[in-house]
Amino acid sequence: MTELRKKYPLIIVGAGPAGLTSSIYASRFRVNNLVIGQLWGGLVSESHQVCNFPTEKKIKGLELAQKIKDHAQSLDASFLSDEVIAIEKNSLQGFRITTKSKKVFQAETVLLAQGTKRRKLNVRDEDKFLGKGVSYCATCDAMFYQDRIVAVVGGSDSAQTSSLYLAQVAKKVYQIYRRDKLRGEAIWIEQVEKNSKIEIIFNSQIKELKGKGNLEAVVIENNQQEERRLAVDGLFIEIGTIPHQHLTKCLGLAVNSEGYIKVSADQKTSQEGIWAAGDITDGSNNFRQIITACAEGAIAAENIFKFLQKK
Ligand SMILES: Cc1cc2nc3c(=O)[nH]c(=O)nc-3n(C[C@H](O)[C@H](O)[C@H](O)COP(=O)(O)OP(=O)(O)OC[C@H]3O[C@@H](n4cnc5c(N)ncnc54)[C@H](O)[C@@H]3O)c2cc1C
């Protein structure tokens, strides 16, 4: 790790698998880089178990995040825990980057790797019950539900893995899904279906959250418009993610209909000097995983290296 400077050939925004892998490659190409990030290791740290990373049969998400971070930090880059709040093109030399703590940097090239944030359910009182029964992270909050009853909303891999994790501590887990079939890795679906503590409720959506102070029940409605009240102590919302868009808009980058940054095969965005990698992009055939985020970060670093060499 090196001390902070004012100017860098490359500034990487985001310290998840994409940003940190890009830093590893850039450092090895001897491109001085600064990584500015908030949650070190990224969303991986919120996964209780990762079983599909080639080097690891089974690893805690936090442990994998730590390994990626340690590798990046063992090389010749700078790191700053902060939030980037603005990026503007200010000269032929590149971009001015401002952070929440009012630090200002100049970068010849920028890699955007801020990933995504959790999608909200958008039901009344969702914010009111946040931390009082409503959660977006089973890994972080499962321990509060020892021998209690919880519900998970969603039908993808993150919902399945959350249900399985919660079933280890909770008395009962309802998994509520609006469609008639779970989707994602068959191996997780099989485990959910086999688990006697998990009851899957298909074709249903959450209509209401009930409780005085803490969450006490949810009202669900099926596709026949029939309502049912389930007594639950916790509700884990796992219905996907949406890309961080503030900096994308700041720079006026081309995006797809869902706000993911459009990238070419070499991870270039629509603006010269700006690359993007990982979950924030429409790359890797929209398959948003740790390995694809790492791969995009590596491709971006190599392309940035070539770009800087030509300058
Ligand atoms: C519960 C859960 C379980 C998962 N399990 C698996 C799994 O088993 N296997 C798998 O392959 N994938 C899994 N994933 C998906 C995987 O975590 C993501 O695909 C991967 O983390 C994407 O990496 P990324 O670097 O693009 O983004 P992220 O990991 O989201 O990292 C983005 C980083 O940017 C930071 N950031 C955001 N905005 C700013 C800003 N303005 N300034 C500075 N920093 C900023 C964030 O704080 C974060 O550190 C899981 C995801 C979740 C939520």
Image (cartoon, helix red, strand yellow):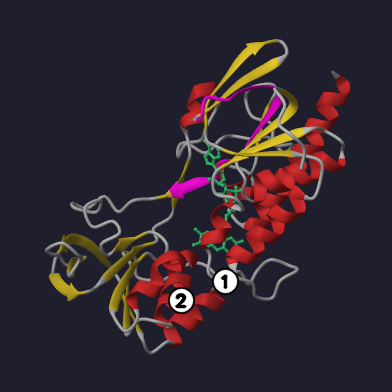
Judged left or right of residue 109, residue 135 is: left
Residue name at image x 64 percent, y 19 percent: 95
Q: Which residue is mark 2?
A: 165
Say which quarter of the image contains residue 50. bottom right
Badge 1 or badge 2: first in the primary sequence:
1
Judge the density around disc 2: few (<14), some (14-19), many (≥20) Cα neighbours within 10 Å: some
Whole-percent x, y for residue 63 in the image: 64, 66
Is 115 covered by the magenta stretch?
yes
Please identify the dominant SS of the magenta region: strand
| The quarter of the displayed image where residue 94 is located | top right
State yes or no: Cβ of the residue under disc 1 lies below 8 Å from any atom of ligand 1.
Answer: yes
Compared to 7, does 77 lie above or below?
Answer: below
Circles 1 and 2: CB distance less than 8 Å? yes
What span is in magenta? 101-117
In depth, the one of 206 and 311 nearer the eye is 311
Foreground of the two, 89 or 285: 89
Residue at image position (47%, 36%) is 259
Q: Residue at x 62, y 45 (%)?
A: 15
Which secondary structure lies at badge 1? loop
Give the residue number, with chain letter if any, for mark 1: 49
Tell me: 53 left or right of 148: right
Taking the magenta stretch, the answer to whether it contains residue 23 is: no
Amino acid type, mark 1 = Gln
Q: Nearer the viewer, residue 257 or 310?
A: 310
Residue 244 visible in the shown view = yes
Distance, label 1 to label 2, CA atoms, is 9 Å
